[in-house]
Image (spheres, rainbow, N blue to C red):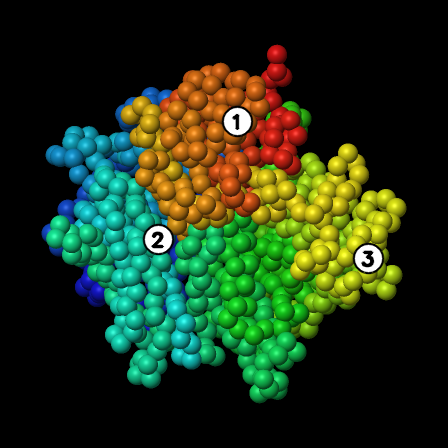
Amino acid sequence: MEAMQPTGWPSPRTAPLRRLIYCAYLGASLAIPAAVALAHDPPPAAETAASTPAATEHPLFVDPAADADETVFGDLLVVPPVGAYGRTPLHIDPIHAAFVRDAWVHPAAGEGLRTASGRRVAWEPLPPAAPGLWEAPQLAGGYAATIVSCDRPRVMLLEASGHAMAYVNGTPRAGDPYGTGRMVCPVALRQGDNDLVFHVAAGRLAARLVEPPQPLYFDLRDAVIPDLIADESGPAFAGVLVVNATDQPSPAAQLTSYRAGAQTITAAVPALPPLGVRRLVVPIDGHLTEDEIEAGSVRVQIDLTLPGNDGERRLADSKAFDLAVVATDALHTRTFLSRIDGSAQPYAVLPAGATAVQSQPATTATAPGVLLALHPSGTPPLNMLRGTPPLPGTHILAPLGRRTFGFDWEDWSRIDALEALADFRNRAAIDPHRVAICGQADGGHGALRLAALHPDRFAATAAVDGWLDYFLYGTSMPAWSQPDRVQELLLACGNDQRLPPLLGNLAPLGVSVQCDPRAPAALVQQSRTLRAALSEFHADFAYRESLGDENPAGSPALSADVTAFLTSRQLPPDASVDLLSFATPNPGLAARCRWVTILAAQDPGEFCRVGAACDDAARTIRVGTENVAGLRIDLGRLAPGAPVAVSIDSEPLREFPWPEGGAKQLRFLRRNDQWQLVPAWPQAWKRPQRSGGFRSVWDRRIALVYGTQGTSEENAWAVAKARFDAEQFLVRGGGAALVAADEQFDADGDPHRNIVLYGNADTNSQWSRLLSESPVQVRTGQVIVGGRPEAGAELACLLVRPRPGSPTALVGAVSGTGVVGMRATDRLPLFVSGVRLPDLLLFDADAATRGVREIRAAGWFGLDWSVPSGRFAWRETAL
């Protein structure tokens, strides 16, 4: 497969020395401390040209045009780590605290600073190891600062790598913590001195400022490029960055994609905020000619146009890239449009090898199975599959998980894996009873977790060098010996990520566990702990400690013995399963197991459990529950017509008439400790599609709406914070979030999308429309929670509520009672794996120096989204 070479990029042979220096240093391993990146393992050596898939091969830094201005910094002032971090909602960081209160002053060499632990450290100069490149042990988790002088106000591109984030004149901007070199960040520099402060993730930092090529332009370094399949003609989707290198919102633009002899496709480009970056979907006509199939590639041109004064559109930028054309049976990359944000997301496919039955027409009985393979952090999906021979009768799918360094197959990575599987099932005839999942390292953790959450979707699972959960592996989870009521609630949030309580869900599956005894002792112990747990109840699991050399060219998770184990298991049809047992930490993560669905929890934050038995001949169903507020029983396995007798939680059997209409379901609600049949689940109540937790607001076509009705400081914070969150979602999760001003946002345009409001009831005009009925109200100087007032000019608040008029959508708020409280939300770890947030988090800005002790309230709304029926913890009891 040929590497994509976008037009206008310098040839590697002619690239200037500065790019070679950047690539040489950034190509080395970037060891990222858990304190900043919060990844379990440091990323492996960056991909070489030989190992990087063609679909994502881009230079780390694009050289500026010959006449473009470029600034490479000299000595930096650096300080070693100063904060106390971890997988908790609030971190202690004295430098962040200074920015919260607008008290940051650029340090002098030798100036002292007290860390979160009380240790005294000092800012020291660090010269570059090469132009634009700094290396030092104290950089890992520390800060680096510099001053850049400008003779006039201007917009430049900050090209930096190896940092978690940066402050540019006090404004937070997303970083590139894993050193990919694919992050581009337009920044506004003022006349005179400009203050740049980097929170460094690794022991190396690369940074420079470059003049943008145009005010609005495409950037292909972080492109998502699919392959075209020779015998398919459906639409394809690529993804490219568009950059707004101005200090104003971008005008109404259009993207047009061209292919010689193919359909021209035009799509609207959503407005970008000032200095914003967004990944766009590029629709491509997938119909291929015989000449294109023979040539093995096609060229796609994309134009970015703006409205002109004469009614004609004017060209803002144009780029071109090549798509490989591959045979049906070749390793290839596909893309799909994610329901999370509408972005194009890739996955790799290794088609099934030939079998005796493949000459027959495809039916459920003869169709191939599917093996979902989850990569370890830092390994692109194509690399995981290279060197692996095709499996007879089984396709192998390797999803990206939104990024190669993503979310440990939690959160959006978990959803991505399921979306990739669903997309492939829509494209190809497969045997749904022969679907299995495997993974290595983080992927092994993900394989176990997805199988445990969805035991009715997988026949078997395999983990090679996997780990269980954040509480058992690593040291970044909170370990409060005597937690107070707020800390107890935060620990309950972490139940969403616990795997041991879900291991019973794996009983019907085949489970294979392997580890390399040469791996770190803590990792080996994870496999041995899992073996001990499974041995207590599981009848079909295999355990092996091996040197991992069986598949030297490919992933150990795809070795012959692992794949033989996985492909030999079959998932029984629902109608043949008379007994089931299922647990879930949250119906929003997983609610259904075959013919039983948990609709809601009684006590949010605690595990829900259900056991059920069905006697088809007697037409009786008996169910036992724990922490379940609502239940749905699917009756599709029974012959229609006669009544069905149901007993829940030892209540006497009661006969219910066969449900009318097309839905063969019975729904039950627990009310006053008794179960009642209900015709439908109330639309306004919590449900699997909308169960709460602040991070869930990012799961459905998110729009970030910033307020413009406050003071100049409040308005500046709102747009900066919305843009910062969109950047973080892009960097960590390959996400595409709409960012819009309150006055320009059209809430009616998509009534079922999720929305986050930045500001409060006084500063964001959309608040009155979307949150006027919320029991939590945030205004200048005060927060009211269910009638209880909390006064203060420096309070910060996160909340999530059901969106009015929609049964599925949510509205969130990133809010504060004043600009200091608003800034206190800037560094919340919204996209860090292992951090869970409840429906409400209310804290004081002093949390930047005192941590969770400054949380005033945290909790979940009740089943009906009210405060009285919810679970809340207050720091101080009400007077």
Left or right position of 527 against 33: right
First of labels 2, 1 by sequence position: 2
Q: CA distance from mark 2 to mark 3?
A: 54 Å
Q: How many marks are shown on the rendered structure?
A: 3
Left or right position of 725 against 854: left
Eyeballing the image, is 784 above or below 731? above
Left or right position of 431 against 114: right
Eyeballing the image, is 397 above or below 467? below
Query: What is the three-letter code of the residue carrying label 3?
Result: Pro
For disc 1, the marked residue is 776
Closer to the eye: label 2 or 3: 3
For disc 2, the marked residue is 279
Residue at the image point whose x is 25% and y is 45% from the top: 250
Query: What is the three-letter code of the residue carrying label 1?
Result: Val
Residue closer to the observer: 27 or 433: 433
For disc 3, the marked residue is 643
Q: CA distance from mark 3 to mark 1?
A: 45 Å
SS for tag 1? strand
Q: Quadrant of the C terminus?
A: top right
Query: What is the three-letter code of the residue carrying label 2?
Result: Arg
